[in-house]
Amino acid sequence: MIVVEPRATLSRPLAALAPVLAGIAAMLLAAIPIAFAGANPIAAYGYMVSGAFGSMFAFSETLTRTTPLILTGLAAAVAFRARLWNIGGEGQLYAGALAAVAIGTGAIDAPSWVMIPLVLLAGAVAGALFFLGPAVLKLKFGADEVVTTLLLNFVMLLFVQMMLEGPLKDPMSLGWPQSAAITDAAALPALIPRMRVHAGLVVGLVAVLAVWLMMKRTVWGMEIRAVGENAPAARYAGIPVTATVLRVALLSGALAGLAGVGEVAGLKGYLTSDLSPGFGYSGIVVAMLAGLSPLGVVAAALFIASVFVGADSMSRGLGVASYIADLVVALSLLSVLVGGFFTRFRLRLARRTPAGAEG
Amino acid sequence: MDILDILLSANFWAASIRIATPLIFGVLGALICERSGVLNLGIEGIFTAGAMAGWMAVWLGLDLWPALLVVLVVGALFGLLHAVLTVPFGLSQHVSGIGITLLATSLSYFIYRTALPNVSTPPRIEPFRPLDIPVLSDLPFLGTALFSHTALTYLAIALVGVVAWILYRTPLGLAIRAVGDNPDSVDAQGLSVHALRTGAVMAGSALMAMGGAFLTMSAFDAFFFGMVNGRGWICIALTVFASWRPGKALLGALLFGAFDAFQVRLQTQVGAFLPSQVFLMLPYLLAIAALVVVARKADYPRALLVPWFKGSR
């Protein structure tokens, strides 16, 4: 019979390899639905790789997709570190996008060096405040933040639709519910001429470095880790648990809000209610693939983005439904979860003790 | 007065019960899982999978009742996956549940899109029809309010009694409740903690899938993307609100259904003054409010979220 036994020490090579193996496992498992859809999996993977990395344009598209995923992934990673289960990245992203549109479409007239920081700040504040509510409900009433953040995603999406049909509607859009365009001064500039990858990527990378330094080098980072590992012990050790949780909530929400700013002010140029194809939810997968490490988030976001961009091209080339990308993302999450198990435990084939052998 | 008109209309009460039906299935399912100590956030995806599987089974030519059997199996299989990850492996129930939701949702959409690549209007099936109960269905008011429903609604309400009976009147129910409160005691009795939890999660997930199937096989007659629309998450909130009791679950689902039916009708009356989205937000906000009100004094199953390994107490 098979016995599960804990490893004496965490297996470091396995811990480092687990996300890579999980990604590979997810891609291999995806061969089953690809074949089911009547396509050759090898050809499908070929389309995916060339679609995501095959040309300068393809790579720019992949980086464009990576941008929001870095930020929502980082948002989830920071929160999960403190065992604050923020599943509301999607709603916080829209909160950020809404704030960007509210002040970036002509309400304020100022030069770029004022407007861009202002739009980013507004988005971050909106995202932070939108997660502050669930965090307070958790601390004050013990309401599970998983459920409240999930439900608030739906509320925020409806709120966005309401705003787009009401106060924020572009009068020139001929009945189509979308906001007015972000002004040139508030728009995040493109990084490469004629490509879509924009300065939001820089914002994401700076955020990664900042969070990494904070977690590693500052008291706040130490407190966050302590609260996540054992909140009662942290409290006993004199760490301000409540303040730490609130701080994490604000940070996590702000990061997700920045993702929304990037999509609106860097990519689309205006807000619609289908701005995000689930970046908030994919961010959870990014965070888990990254092992909640800020630097790992970049690699994980790049992987997930390449799956989405590659799947689009596979879908066009072979007619496989592009939902295959969501399927790979889901399989990656489950695979990395299993991988994490094997870094902490091993399976051993144990011989059954013969009856009566003892005594 | 307008509001009184709403409350006095039989259609309003019929709609309340109709809206409550998938939630009754969902809350019962979530309650069984959580009573055994396992939070199942796969519910939203399992609803979607149940809705898709039931619709597709009928569309492929199966009769309604055999199609429901398919739904139960699909739900139980996703439950098995969640149980394997969270029970013997003891992995994070939160993350695994979200993973199951992502998997079940994307798999359902993928299969639907693969089967029907180029349709713009979703194909319809012949769904469950309201049962025509002799005498009762012809009663004034009550006939419409209570006896105009499909078999699935009556099945959901009957299941409330069945689940309550199993949980509180049978040794199996005692074992399920014990394994969610104090798994060591169950182990000491010589029962398998892992088998009990796995079984409970599979059974609960099968019921969740029924909740989804109600949408495509009774409430509507086709499958749409995004049709579950947070109903699963609402069930998780209602489970806490019901303090993990089947009777209260029925009450909570009916109250919620009544509220939802009420807001739809209110919307048609005062819709000119407020955007429709305000009304559509209300159910989600109500679910949050229900959770907040009871959260402090909620009597969570004591071993909820806590994995159990043999010999490590």
Image (cartoon, rainbow, N blue to C red):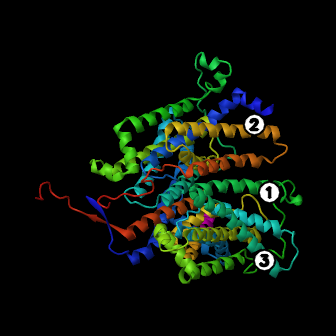
Instruction: Give above or below for B307 relative to A207.
Output: above
Q: Chain of mark 3?
A: A
Mark 3, residue position: A116
Residue where numbered disc 1 is placed? A163
Q: Secondary structure at mark 1?
A: helix
Horizontal relation, residue A213 to residue B185: left or right: right
Query: Magenta span has A312?
Result: yes
Q: How many callouts does the rendering have?
A: 3
Q: Secondary structure at mark 3?
A: helix
Query: Dot 2 corresponds to which residue?
Result: B265
Quick one: label 3 or label 1, which is nearer the N terminus?
Answer: 3
Pick the quarter of the image with the C terminus of chain A. Answer: bottom left
Toward which corner of the image does residue A60 lie, by quadrant?
Answer: bottom right
Pointers 3 and 1 in contact (CB under 8 A)? Answer: no
| Marks 1 & 2 on one chain | no
Pinpoint the chain carrying mark 1: A
Question: In this picture, which residue range is highlighted in magenta?
Answer: A306-313
Q: Type of residue at label 1?
A: Met
Q: In which image quadrant can residue A13 be found?
A: bottom left
| Identity, as a three-letter code, of the amino acid under mark 3 | Ile
